[in-house]
Amino acid sequence: METWFIFGILSYLSYAISTSIDKYMMNEKYNTIKTNTLKMFFDGIILLIASSIFFNISITNNLIFGSLILGSIYAFSGIFYFETLNLKDVSSIVPYYSSASLLFIFFGSIIFFNEIVNIFNYIGIAAIMIGIYLVLSETGLRLPKKDKGLTYATIVIIFSVSYSLLTKLFLNDIEPMALAICMYFSATLFLILYLHIFKKENLKQITHYKRYKKQIKNIFIASFFGASGTFLLYYALSVGNASKVYPLVGLQMIFIFMIATIMLKEKFRLHKFIGTLIVFIGIFLISI
């Protein structure tokens, strides 16, 4: 197996664990934006500690610029994503967002980075998109209705595609660990500014410990796996083509499906299992 493939798989496994914990926290009615802000901060701290032990990081103008751009996109993407979930049926909007984002990222990688793909890769991306839609959907192939929620989801797609392609661009001359750390701290800053300006909360209210006391363990565990996933993904992108690395997100959906079915005791659905098999086929074709 190639290095990008191994790190890509490990990345999306870590993301799947983090996302499953996120799902549990949402079911427990955690405040989504504030929880996400704390998660971003923990992500940065975890990677900073790891880097101080294993890596040497140098601060450059490119690093500061890149992390501010990525952090702002990441933060506002999260805000619109959670707002979308408040307005829209998750079973229809998440498959739409995930499949559409992957499609645009794939073709964006080919157009902007001149990455070479073959006919098997095109078939693979189509299979992964269909598989993702089936795995994430509660009802099979069902398109979302045109409304405010769909508009927000489309904005999230634009943010997601921009973030993914810019990440690959910045990794051409920035170390993966350095970019991941600064991106998370940048995202934390923008989320705090959002809460202060639009939600009228001061820093003391946002960081009040007692508000998170019962949640802190779950948030930290989710942050650990989220931070690990980001570093592994950034490293995979630094050594592999974006058009091959990003489609591995299909594995994340499979891992989430398995965790939800086994650990969270969610109901088994045949179309999700079929979608899982289709994703496996697609990933094999992408790797050729």
Image: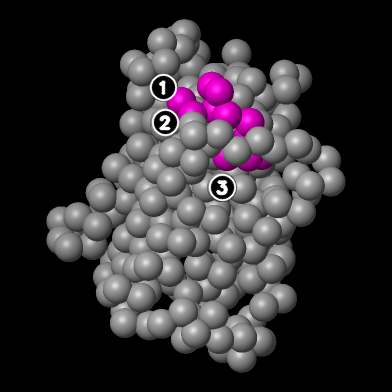
Q: Residue at x 41, y 82 (%)?
A: 202
Q: Residue at x 43, y 69 (%)?
A: 192
What's the amino acid at mark 1? Ser
What's the amino acid at mark 3? Cys
* Label 3 vs 1, first from the N-terminus: 1
* Front tag of 2 and 3: 3
Q: Is residue 103 left or right of residue 244?
A: left
Question: Can you identify the residue that label 1 sits on?
Answer: 109
* Label 2 vs 3, first from the N-terminus: 2
Question: Can you identify the residue that label 3 sits on?
Answer: 182
Q: Is residue 97 above or below residue 267?
A: above
Q: Is residue 218 left or right of residue 257?
A: right
Considering depth in this image, is 14 or 174 the residue closer to the camera?
A: 174
**Extreme bottom residue here?**
210
Q: Residue 28: horizontal and vertical position, in percent?
A: 55, 82
Kindly report the distance in space between the C-alpha atoms of the residues bearing marks 1 and 2: 7 Å
Determine the secondary structure under disc 3. Answer: helix
Q: Quadrant of the N terminus?
A: top right
Considering depth in this image, is 271 or 153 the residue closer to the camera?
A: 153
Q: Residue 101: horizontal and vertical position, in percent?
A: 37, 39
* Label 1 vs 2, first from the N-terminus: 1
Q: Is residue 126 left or right of residue 279?
A: left
Determine the secondary structure under disc 1. Answer: helix
Give the magenta part as a residue range.
Answer: 169-179
Q: Residue 257: horizontal and vertical position, in percent?
A: 60, 55
- Whether residue 205 is visible to the viewer of this picture, yes or no, is yes
What's the amino acid at mark 2? Leu
Question: Can you identify the residue that label 2 sits on?
Answer: 165
